[in-house]
Image: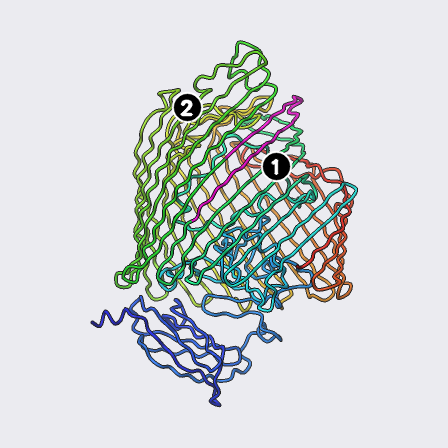
Amino acid sequence: MPVFCFSQNVQIKGVVKDSLNNTIPFVSIIASNSQNEEQILAYSTSKENGSYVLIVKNNTNLDSIWLTYRHMQYETLKIQKNASSQNVDVVLKVAVNKLDDIILHAKKKIEIKGDTITYNVAGLKKEKDYSIEEVIDRIPGVTISDDGQIRYKERPISHLYINGVDLLEGKYNIATRGIPASAVEDIDIMQKHNHARIDIGKTESDNVAFNLKIKEDHSLVFGSSKGDLGVPLLTGNAEITPIYLKEKLQDIASFKINNIGKSLKDNGRSLTSGNRNLAALKLPEINIINEPDMNGTVISNKYWLDNESYAITNDALYKTKNDVIFKTGINHNYNFNQIERNDNSAYYFDNDSTIVNRNIKNQLLERKYDAGVVAEINRDDFYLKNKTMFNAVNSDGNSSLLQNQEAIDASYLSDKISFSNSLELKTSISDKILNSGLLISYEEQKEELKVLPAQFESVFNPSFTPDFTKQLNDINRLNIGAFSSYNFDIKKTKLELKQTINWSSESLLSSLTQNNSANSSIPVFPFSADYTLNSFQTVSSLSSSWQWKRFTFRLNPQVTFINLNQKNRTSELNSNSNNYFFFEPSVNASYKFNQNWNSSLGYNRTRNTSTFNQLFTGLQLRDFTSLSRNPNAVNVRREDALNHFLTYKSILKGVIISNNFRWFKNKSDFTISSSIDDNGLITTDAVKQPNILEGWSNRLSFTKSFFRIIKTDLSYSYRNFKSEQFFNDIPQENINRSHSGNLELTLDNNTWYGISYQGIINYGLSQINDFETSNTFIKHKVEVDFYLSSKTRWNLGTESVISTFSNDQNVNRNTLFNTSFYYKPSKKLFLRASLINIFNEDFFTTSSSNANFINQSQFSLRPRQLTIGFNYTL
């Protein structure tokens, strides 16, 4: 009977008053397992009359709990109480000079309640900020990548909510770049976040989610619009994002079109992985033929990318009274991109080398269609989510190049259709969570590559003179997976039992031929393949964690069984069935020094086999210069890794420090063998010889905010990797070392000036047998704003890159400039005039090196452009 009572919820209520017997509203009350608040058990806030209620789910059988009372104007009070329901009335003393300087400013800029940090937008926003993404980027610990993905303390966020609702299912760059900063009141950062309400207080989480609180007095319909027009090239940009927000109905639409060097390929793309258990069931992406390379240089796309893009999205949400949510979303992207560059490459082996010069012009047109429907029930005692997705992608590209004085043309086609349905279910058994999921997906893809004139003639030996080489692939994939996990406690040990089952069937029908107008080579193995792979995999694991004083220990032994059943109708050599059994343990120990300092040390062992993309043995023309063939066997890779983390955080002081060390050793059954001829044609195979890839890395990062006007992000990384390969039949031991430093500094006093600086330096050293080369890369990006008045601003921007090789006396120096003038006649309207690429209109040069390969690239730049544009808040 005492055990039964002890497992029930503990209710603590009372009233908070001051020494004059006046009630105190808005006091943060936290229940924790220790005086240092190592584990937050519950938190609440006192009401207008000073009363509060705490519901503590005593899952850890504590004898006592600590209560912490915080208020900006009073001294913090900590008291220890028995872990039983009771009334606790407290009296707080007025604080005298107890608060950090950052709290003593006129308005409340930051508030901490338990694991949630709330930033007031008015306290972060500067005059030049228009979208909420620009404000989010000012939060200490936040970095935002080019595609709009938000990272907090170097981890991608799991959700972005608008008024507590996740409308966009990971496609949040539509919202962050479309919602005006003026429409948002606060930004919540929710650490240790659980999306499913049934998990709160029962399941540990390391997820971080953001919540945008729209101002209460804001209109139901709002949004943003943007437009630009440029000459002498007729360029244009138009964007509009109408938003409708109501308690039970939300809708965000977006239409964007431009040819100003801003690709919309990532617009509407999911930036989160979703449920990790379901994500682990997905098949890896596969593209056997490489599409034309559209990767540019390190400078901003507006200087070099020649594009025509538009994107249309619409996402709607309806919420019923009983916490049932329905979501629908559609997305269409059209992107036609062109890139032109010159590559001078060198491949080294012993005392010899091969030089390849390429003049390349690539074009790629990609049409993408997405549609999805989501039904979700999110209650305190039950969670269910069903997500159905349809995707279609059509890619049409071509490459024209002059390679070592030989003209080559290649055309590329790809059509891909996929369908998936995922189901996630959570319910409680004896106050513990049973989590289950099911995933079904199907996809088919057709690929075609045609290269003129014919390549790799010595491999084919046709009886006629061919005009072109052609690769055709037809891929079909069916995948069914399920998982189930259950959390429970044994005394003070928390455990999770999880079982995963996956079955997939993948097939490839391919042919590689050489043709002319009258003849074509007859495809036989290995030039043709009719290959099927059926895979079955089960994973069983029992994770456990327990606490001892300030230590937390985690142990996760995992057992994996894999069956690979291969069949190739064109060659019996590739038809077999293999079984694999792996034991993969991982262990982690962490120590919490205090509220700010944490450290952890972990070891994990992983084992995996070749995937479908690495198993079929037919010859494949990957691109116009690469021919490859997989080994006729399954490759087993074995990795052991050691990780160490040390972190420090002080949110009120705006300081975040982290150090991440990783060592790993990867063993493989095969070693890659590549060869290149004098014309730059590369063939790749695998040799049945054990290969070891070993290395270690360390990353140190530092973030600090000063006086609300300066944000500093500093990081340093060191990497040391060693691997083995064959190149032109010569064994090579590759050693790669690199030092990388990154500094981002933002200073804006919001009165007469603002400075934004990003500096990157990278020094890389490559050793291959007796050959050694180093590569230095330095980049500076500076923007200076002058606030000429309360309504006008002048911006100057520059990007500079310096790159060198140790064996090349030439130093590549490039500097580009742009300038803009901004005028804000009203709160809703921004006007601007910009001059882009003021001086350099020819080309931009950069260089890189890796293993036995060094490369120098010259990218053609867009002409100088004068643009006039506006931003308007709807």
Query: SS for tag 1?
Result: loop
Q: Nearer the viewer, residue 718 or 504?
A: 504
In the displayed orientation, state which residue is furthest to the front. Answer: 321
In the displayed orientation, state which residue is furthest to the bottom. Answer: 20
Residue 408 within the segment the image draws in magenta:
yes
- The span shown in magenta is 387-416
Report whether 709 appears left or right of 502: right
Rendered location of residue 789, percent (x, y): 77, 65
Q: In the rendered view, how is the structure colored? A: rainbow
Where residue 530 is drawn, which disc sits there? 2
Q: Nearer the viewer, mark 1 or mark 2?
A: 2
Q: Is residue 643 above or below residue 765?
A: below
Q: Nearer the viewer, residue 434 or 310?
A: 310
Query: SS for tag 2?
Result: strand
Rendered location of residue 768, percent (x, y): 52, 33
Report whether 465 appears left or right of 507: right
**N-term-proximal mark, 1 vs 2:** 1
In the displayed orientation, state which residue is furthest to the left. Answer: 1
